[in-house]
Amino acid sequence: MTVIDLRSDTVTQPSNGMREAMANAPMGDDVYGEDPSVNKLESELALRLGFAKALFVPTGTMSNLLALMAHCGRGDEYIVGQQAHTYKYEGGGAAVLGSIQPQPLEVQADGSLDLGQVAAAIKPDDFHFARTRLLALENTMQGKVLALEYLAAASRLTREHGLALHLDGARLYNAAVKLGVDAGEITRHFDSVSVCLSKGLGAPVGSVLCGTTDLIAKARRLRKMVGGGMRQAGQLAAAGLYALDHQVERLADDHANAQLLAEGLRAAGYEVEPVQTNMVYVQIDERAQALKAFAAEEGIMLSAAPRLRMVTHMDVSRSQIEQVVAVFSEFSRQ
Ligand SMILES: *Cc1c(COP(=O)(O)O)cnc(C)c1O
């Protein structure tokens, strides 16, 4: 039985073309700055996203951490979504390792932060307060795409208040493909951007942080400090380069599969949230564990949550989505 794993888009196997690119990658010691494949990935992505420099790191968590620590010092503050990955799912790293105070705000239904609330949360220059330095946004946010006009408004607001603007763009390319724009149209509003290669893009490992020359120099120092300086990392960078060249446009297939899944589940009586990219959220309530076990018997791997998240990716085909819909239909008839 082939397994259909819908828990996340991190579960993909490297494609044959990617494996070949990895096998043939020229390598060197990246801590010495001598890995040609890493250097190529960094310069290529910086160029494509409109930044001076970029830095290859093992994970998106490290990429965001380095960005936060490069923008903010001890006792500084960043404004972030209550449900954002950087705040909620990264072990509190910015606070633990960077002594950076988060100012979380509730995320709006469309995945954005209300800019009025952001403005109100920026603290005046007064020694009673932490210094508000940065606004961090996430795109896509739980599969939702932030509008370009919103990004422009966020950029204006942060510039008016002397704040930096960081994007957790773990799924930047899902947003770009959904909007039908060059990813640079999104990233041009930001001072730094973190991109995951290991999500929908299908690379086994790796993220890239993009920013100014000064910011990336700070991040490079911090990367060594937190143990993220890798040596012959060129194979991993080659996977990332391959993904950027060959596996971006196909994200549209994942989005179409997510729509198909949502429509099928709605037809079977499930309450499904509107879908924009590759994430489908379904209200399962107290049946979560039972559904997970039922699906597992049919080779479908799910997380168990009352608000179930299913993520489409390159290792799930359209016909497998139809299988999933059939299994959910059977479960609901029980
Ligand atoms: C996955 C993810 C990250 C970082 O993930 P790692 O597992 O550390 O690579 C950051 N932000 C978002 C929104 C993510 O989905």
Image (tube, rainbow, N blue to C red):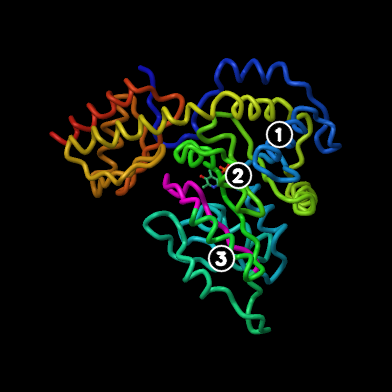
Mark 2 residue's CB less than 8 Å from ligand 1: yes
Q: CA distance from mark 2 to mark 3?
A: 19 Å
Please name the amino acid that badge 2 sits on.
Gly
Q: Earlier in the sequence, mark 1 or mark 3?
A: 1
Q: Is residue 151 above or below residue 22?
A: below
- Residue 79 tag number: 3
> Residue at left 38%, top 18%?
2
For the N terminus, which image quadrant?
top left
Tell me residue 177's x, y (percent). 48, 36
| The residue stretch that appears in magenta | 133-148
Residue at label 2?
60
How busy is the neighbourhood of tag 3: few (under 14 within 10 Å), some, or many (20 plus)? many
Q: Is residue 145 magenta?
A: yes
Tell me residue 217's x, y (percent). 80, 50
Q: Earlier in the sequence, mark 2 or mark 3?
A: 2
Please name the amino acid that badge 3 sits on.
Ile
Q: Is residue 198 above or below residue 116?
A: above
Q: Is residue 280 magenta?
A: no
Query: In the figure, residue 131 lies in which quadrant?
Result: bottom right
Query: In the figure, residue 71 lies in which quadrant?
Result: bottom right
Query: In the figure, residue 137 lies in which quadrant?
Result: bottom right
Q: Is residue 25 above or below residue 184?
A: above
Secondary structure category for the residue under label 1:
helix
Residue at label 1?
44
